[in-house]
Amino acid sequence: MCGRFALGIPKKRLEEVFGLPMPDDYAPCYNAAPGSDVLCLDGQGFARRRWGLVPAWADSPQIGARLINARSETVFDKPSFREGARARRLLVPAQAFYEWRREGRVRTPFAFGLRDADCFAMAGIGASWTDPRSGQVLDSLSVLTCPPNAVMADIHERMPVILPPAAWSAWLDPAAERGDLARLLVPYPAGAMRVWPVSPRVNSPVTDGPELLEAVPDPGPDKGPPAPPEQGRLL
């Protein structure tokens, strides 16, 4: 799954990578968590959306807490996700994502990044929900997941869909066919990724700062604090 990620890349660098101007209010975040507003990119440019998808038909925005991820295998069919997969596809920039190795009661956080790039784009889908009382519109998103590659498999059974730059335009293309899109939703090559243990301070979603990405010694299966509870569900 993908329940936390980091994006601390300087604004100028992100503009170079994605070829578009960044929002003036961009600020690095090293511990983006569900329920927060995260940076994304659609066919029009950069925007912010609440992480945790709230479909237009939802009775309450509370459903978003359960829809932070969408399985790539079923995203075009599930009622919660199919409209976003059809017409509201997004890129979600990241520098790294976090996942916890679970061995008994011990949970050890790890960061995952790319060997040859300082940032990447995860596949996402969006939705817009209108509060029936206030009329206020909530724009939200979900990050797509796929089966793990060899780097991820020992730690979690799912991983976010990372799209290579060559696939960005195809994923955002409003005229793209479902079959062509589905072929993009595959595990990122294991040899192009790296993984390292990080401080358990990342367990708290209120903790932030570049030190969260610093490598620490792996405490092993017999040491370390419990991880945070599972966030969302892989629907």
Image (cartoon, rainbow, N blue to C red):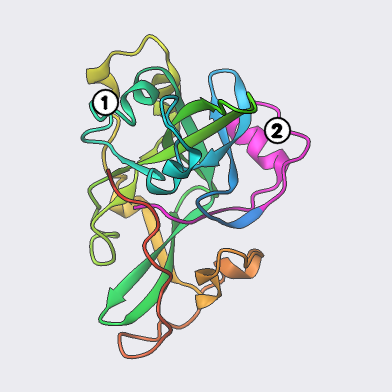
Position of the C terminus, as image quadrant, is top left
Q: Secondary structure at mark 2?
A: loop
Residue type, numbered disc 2: Met
Q: Indicate which disc, 2 or 1, sits on the residue closer to the N terminus.
A: 2
Q: Which residue is label 1 attached to? A: 76
Report x, y in % for residue 20. 65, 26
Taking depth in this image into account, of 81 and 133 the one nearest to the observer is 133
Farthest bottom residue?
222
Seen as rendered, the residue at the extreme top is 175
Q: Amino acid at mark 1?
A: Phe
Number of numbered discs visible in the structure rendering: 2
Percent of width and height locating residue 92: 50, 38
Q: Is the residue 67 above or below the residue 103 in the image?
A: above
**Residue 177: image x %, image y %?**
28, 13
* Residue 5 inside the magenta-drawn segment: yes
Left or right of 193: which side holds 74?
left
Q: Which range of residues does the magenta coloring cover?
A: 1-28
Could you tell me if residue 82 is visible in this image?
yes
Residue 17: say if magenta.
yes
Q: Residue at x 32, y 50 (%)?
A: 233
Q: Which residue is mark 2?
A: 22
Magenta-drawn stretch, dominant element (helix, strand or loop): loop
Residue farthest right in this picture? 24
